[in-house]
Amino acid sequence: MKLLIIAFSILNLSSIFAQTHKNENYKTEINFGNGFIVTSFLKVKQKKNKIRLTSPKNSDVRLVGFLKAKTGRLLGKSPKKGILVRINAVLKKDSLSGYISTTLLDKLQLKGKLKNGLLTGIIYKNKKIVGNIKGKKSKQTKIKYSHLYQKIIKLTEQNLFSHEFLKSDKWKKYKKELKKKLDKVQDDIELYIAFKMLNFKLPFSHYYLIIREKSNKKMDEIKEQAVVYEKKNANTDYLKIKNFSTSQKELSIILPKILKSKPNNLIIDLRDNPGGGIEAAFEFGKYFISNNSEIGFFVTNKLQYTGFDYQLFRTLPKAKPQTTIEFIEYLKHKKGAQLVFDKSNIPTFSGHLYVLTNRYTGSTCEPIVYILKKSKTATIIGEKTAGAMLSGTSFNLSDKYNLFIPIADFYTRDGVRLEGLGVTPDIITKSDEALNKTLEIIKKNK
């Protein structure tokens, strides 16, 4: 009998030890959704059935230096111990259930497994699957990035929309700082943040690093609805367009229905819309721009110019691209183009049009807002737009990293350079008050 008790005790202890993961290190690929996939190194701490996985410590020191990092922590502006990703979970046998906290995104839910040196799981946001996580026990604790430096500089200097900036002291300083950061950062999250921080110092937009691993295609196909439509009341419709990248199909279905119902008032919400491509923008334009229009001029580093030159820009060929890819490929090899919009035979909206904007309304949105304001087709309400109107594309750095570079500057037909300027609304109000302000105006006008 005693032998049986001892045997069962040994088996029970073995079972406990099998579930212990203290001080293990996992090289982990985290897919946060929307193509944002990063590699980090998660260290495991376990106390009974509670488990914590954390990315490398002192990332803030590597990103901003010792003094700024310590000050940031004291003020509560830097994460505790400089840890950018924390997973707090409960481990039952091999199953994990908990939350992911990061400095980049809102808190996310995780359900997965930790077994036999493998970490796997599904990431949820508001009960919807947004991504996944895959890790393997490893002795590796950091990634080397210094080899990316030369290629980043070469690609930028060959393709940036203007060579003038490359002659400046700012560019020389930027190169030095970039080299230092690439020597220090340890994982993809630090790399992404470091690049983004440095880019705030540059006098142009559309320059950033894209990090993408080969991943589950089903996860890549998960896309959030890009257009939201609702009736605010009997006379007012509301249309939220989250981007001009993936919204063309939705717009082609919803906009005809709106025109057919003929609301007296239509609110187009472009707040937080970062822009996108030509396809969705032209789809939108068909229903709101009533005449053939010269949108503006795109100019590249292959054209010798200093500022707006109407006579010179008018010599550029007129472009009526069918797709964004087609237009970008054209700009890569040419001096520039006049972008022209030809009105279709579709009737345009004839009611009162209101467009909501904020400081995150950028890129493709901005010429649209500018034209609608200048032609007095719409009343613009909210905050000044982002002032981020350049045309860019991505260039390959490696199997995993791409560099997005602005390859063409943009001027409106009447000479306004929207980059760094933005579009000022007709009625200025805080972003979160713009919709209520618009509804008040509609009610008053009624």
Image (spheres, grey):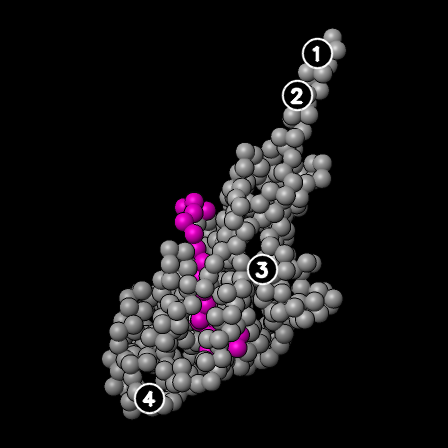
Report whether 329 appears left or right of 3: left
Q: Nearer the viewer, mark 2 or mark 3?
A: 2
Dot 2 amino acid type: Leu
Question: Marks 2 and 3, Cα distance to the nearest angstrom?
Answer: 43 Å
Labels 3 and 4 touching (C-beta < 8 A): no
Give the residues drawn in magenta, as a range.
200-219
Q: In terms of secondary structure, where does tag 2 sit?
A: helix
Relative vertical location of residue 13 with respect to residue 425 in this rendering, above or below: above
Gap in Å between the C-alphas at discs 3 and 4?
A: 39 Å
- Residue topped by disc 3: 104
Name the N-terminal-most of marks 2 and 3.
2
- Amino acid marked by disc 3: Leu
Q: Earlier in the sequence, mark 2 or mark 4?
A: 2
Mark 1 surroundings: few (<14), some (14-19) or many (≥20) residues within 10 A? few
Which residue in the structure is indicated by mark 2?
Answer: 11
Would residue 145 be found to the left or right of residue 283 on screen? right
Can residue 300 be seen in this snapshot? yes
Q: Which residue is mark 1?
A: 4
Task: Point out residue 322 in the picture as x, y percentages from the top left corner.
Answer: 29, 66
Camera-nearest label, 4 or 1:
1
Tag on residue 305?
A: 4
Q: Secondary structure at mark 1?
A: helix
Magenta: main secondary structure: loop
Q: Name the residue at 68% across, 25% down.
A: 13
Q: Is residue 386 inside the magenta stretch?
A: no
**Nearer to me, 198 or 320:** 198
Disc on the earlier residue, 3 or 1: 1
Residue type of the residue flagged with mark 4: Tyr
Outermost residue, top side: 1
Please state which of residues 162 and 401 is positioned toward the viewer in this rendering. 401
The residue at the point 65 percent across, 68 percent down is: 66
